[in-house]
Image (cartoon, coloured by chain):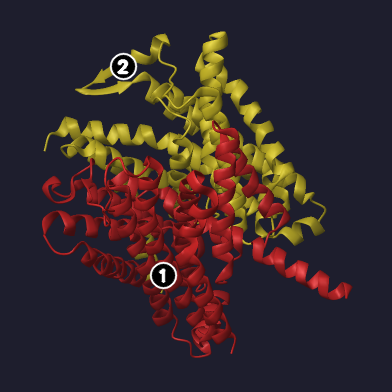
């Protein structure tokens, strides 16, 4: 086997895992802390991508600068959606949450289709998009590298918040025991609101990066919802720390198949879901 | 007793459905073509939704119904393309392949619950879609898919009928076929509801461990539900393949089918026979109305309807009807 090709596959996989982790960790927050099955999560990602695109087109904002605008914008969008609908289904059955958030997803996706149309859009003419480095025959694009580093930085920041700050402690407390948390004086509803808004902001940040890496259309969101769900489930519900490992596993597998197998690029999705399926089945048998 | 009354009602509905296309034609003339296509949408949605609900009664929330649909569609398409046998043989073959697939998927997912089960079934459907795409294209047509012969070739003399009449004629036979499949699915669902199966199903849904302690063989009932749920969907896929005229991985294994299979029963009312049907009728009509009124971006309205329905009728149309009836009784 060609060693450089193998190294290239591994490296691209590692770089791609950062974005998966960033998007999935937001969903894990929504499921783990609030207990809400959010089928609109990928749409926050999509909105982030198109906001960054619009900021670039209208004002020439560099995507890196857009990160600082998109995050608060998505935070506010998330908060609005939480206040107007999510908070009413906190105790409803999972299926009701699914349908509600799915409805929200349809609204966001079709609003985007009306505003931006169905064609793929991308922030293509930033000067650094074509910069790449060669290390021993393996090439590293600056954009994937930067998006990996930024993603990991944000995910690490989230871990820090959850582990070391009062807000994070409150979120973990609420996640463990809602009644107990409210008994010791935590404002549960406010913490849920913050967690949901934060979850949307994290997805939006991922969206900014996808707008530079790929050329998304407004229908890209649902696919990312499904993938993020798969990663969260792979890590185990409520296990926010497991997200990094799960993202790395699927991203590596995708990338290795795409680089090593002839015509492997079209197999990316199949490999992704095959891994999820096998892991879920094997794990369930072992526990039984 | 209740079953017998329901079956009588169903027989009446069958008679009505049989004459419905003629009635439409009589009353709406040219506009009847679009009413008929709305009815076709509603009926096929109802089959999908009711089948999904049958499985959900055991607590198994499938995201794999596009796979059963696709298995039925593809097995028919391949049979028709590769052999010269009667087109109608495709329908039982579709049912068979959907059932085999369901047994396979159902037996490996027995230990999975809730969202884990849902994601596993979704992954299964996505992998199957890729497998179909990678089959030799002489067999399954690759990413482009295969064309499928129509089941019905209405006889008409060119020039003697208007264009809308020919379109109507073409859809009329399909509608009767869908209606027949829907009636069969309803009978299936009613039989389950009135037998001891319904107790076993809801015991498993409520708490599988407790059900097992009470002597309910959970694995057997869960697999049975899988089989019964997949059969109508497989046949539906086959009919749809004939009517649309082609199958392709992206269209036939569309995750949208899976989503509709679950959205509709929730909208109508879960774990009942009537709920998914009302849901299908409601959603198909609302979508058609919105499409005509707003054209571009009409799905925004569809999304708003879904959100509002969960906020204001969390138990679906059935829940709404139940509380209306209760309020009426109390006011008397």
Nearer-the-camera pick, B300 or B225: B300
Q: Which residue is mark 1?
A: B229
Quadrant (top left/top right/bottom left/bottom right) for the N terminus of chain B: bottom right
Circles 2 and 1, Cβ within 8 Å, touching? The answer is no
Quadrant (top left/top right/bottom left/bottom right) for the C terminus of chain B: bottom right
Dot label at residue A132: 2
Residue drawn at x 27%, y 36% is A10
Shown in red, the chain is B
Asked if residue B203 can be seen in this view, the reply is: no
Residue drawn at x 51%, y 19% is A53
Shown in yellow, the chain is A
Residue drawn at x 39%, y 37% is A17
| Residue A4 on image: x %, y % | 17, 30
The quarter of the picture where residue A147 lies is: top left
- Chain under disc 2: A
- Chain under disc 1: B
| Residue A272 on image: x %, y % | 33, 47
Q: Residue furthest front?
A: B160
The answer to whether residue B264 is left or right of residue B228 is: right
Cα separation between marks 2 and 1: 53 Å
| Residue A230 on image: x %, y % | 43, 50
């Amino acid at each position: 086997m060609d060693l450089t090709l193998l190294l290239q596959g591994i490296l691209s996989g590692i770089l791609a895992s950062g974005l998966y982790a960033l998007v999935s960790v937001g969903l894990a927050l929504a499921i783990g802390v609030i207990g809400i099955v959010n089928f609109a999560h990928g749409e926050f990602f999509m909105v982030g991508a198109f906001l960054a695109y619009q900021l670039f087109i209208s004002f020439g904002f560099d995507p890196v600068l857009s990160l600082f605008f998109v995050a608060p914008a998505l935070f506010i969008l998330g908060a609005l959606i939480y206040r107007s609908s999510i908070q009413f289904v906190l105790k409803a059955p999972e299926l009701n949450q699914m349908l509600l958030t799915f409805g929200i997803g349809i609204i966001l996706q079709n609003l985007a289709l009306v505003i931006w149309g169905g064609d793929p859009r991308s922030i293509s003419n930033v000067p650094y998009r074509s910069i790449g480095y060669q290390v021993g025959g393996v090439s590293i694009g600056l954009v994937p590298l930067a998006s990996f580093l930024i993603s990991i930085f944000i995910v690490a920041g989230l871990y820090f918040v959850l582990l070391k700050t009062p807000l994070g402690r409150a979120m973990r407390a609420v996640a463990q025991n809602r009644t107990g948390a409210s008994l010791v004086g935590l404002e549960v509803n406010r913490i849920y609101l913050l967690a949901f808004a934060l979850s949307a902001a994290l997805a939006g940040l991922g969206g900014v990066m996808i707008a530079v890496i790929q050329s998304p259309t407004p229908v890209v969101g649902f696919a990312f919802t499904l993938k993020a769900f798969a990663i969260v489930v792979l890590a185990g519900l409520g296990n926010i720390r497991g997200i990094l490992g799960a993202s790395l596993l699927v991203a590596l597998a995708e990338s290795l198949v795409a680089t090593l197998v002839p015509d492997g690029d079209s197999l990316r999705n199949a490999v992704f879901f095959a891994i999820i399926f096998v892991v879920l089945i094997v794990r369930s048998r072992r526990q039984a | 007793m209740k079953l017998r009354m329901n079956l009588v009602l169903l027989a009446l509905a069958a008679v009505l459905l049989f004459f419905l296309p003629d009635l439409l034609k009589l009353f709406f003339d040219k506009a009847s073509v679009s009413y008929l296509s709305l009815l076709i949408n509603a009926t096929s949605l109802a089959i999908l939704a009711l089948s999904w609900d049958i499985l959900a009664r055991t607590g198994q929330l499938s995201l794999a119904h596009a796979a059963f649909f696709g298995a039925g569609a593809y097995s028919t398409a391949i049979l028709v393309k590769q052999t010269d046998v009667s087109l109608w043989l495709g329908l039982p073959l579709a049912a068979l392949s959907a059932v085999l697939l369901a047994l396979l998927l159902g037996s490996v997912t027995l230990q999975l619950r809730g969202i884990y089960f849902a994601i596993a079934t979704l992954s299964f459907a996505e992998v199957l879609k890729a497998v179909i795409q990678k089959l030799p294209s002489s067999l399954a047509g690759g990413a482009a898919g295969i064309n499928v012969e129509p089941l019905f070739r209405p006889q008409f003399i060119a020039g003697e009928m208007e264009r809308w009449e020919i379109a109507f004629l073409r859809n009329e036979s399909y509608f009767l076929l869908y209606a027949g499949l829907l009636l069969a699915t309803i009978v299936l669902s009613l039989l389950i509801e009135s037998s001891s199966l319904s107790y076993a199903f809801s015991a498993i849904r409520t708490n599988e461990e407790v059900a097992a302690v009470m002597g309910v063989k959970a694995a057997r009932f869960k697999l049975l539900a899988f089989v019964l749920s997949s059969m109508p969907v497989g046949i539906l896929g086959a009919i749809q393949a004939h009517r649309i005229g082609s199958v392709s991985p992206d269209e036939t294994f569309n995750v949208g089918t899976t989503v509709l299979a679950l959205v509709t029963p929730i909208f109508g009312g879960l774990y009942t026979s009537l709920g998914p049907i009302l849901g299908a009728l409601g959603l198909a009509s609302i979508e058609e109305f919105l499409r005509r009124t707003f054209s571009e971006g009409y799905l925004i309205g569809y999304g708003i309807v879904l959100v509002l329905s969960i906020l204001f009728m969390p138990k679906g149309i059935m829940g709404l009807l139940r509380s209306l009836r209760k309020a009426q009784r109390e006011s008397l």
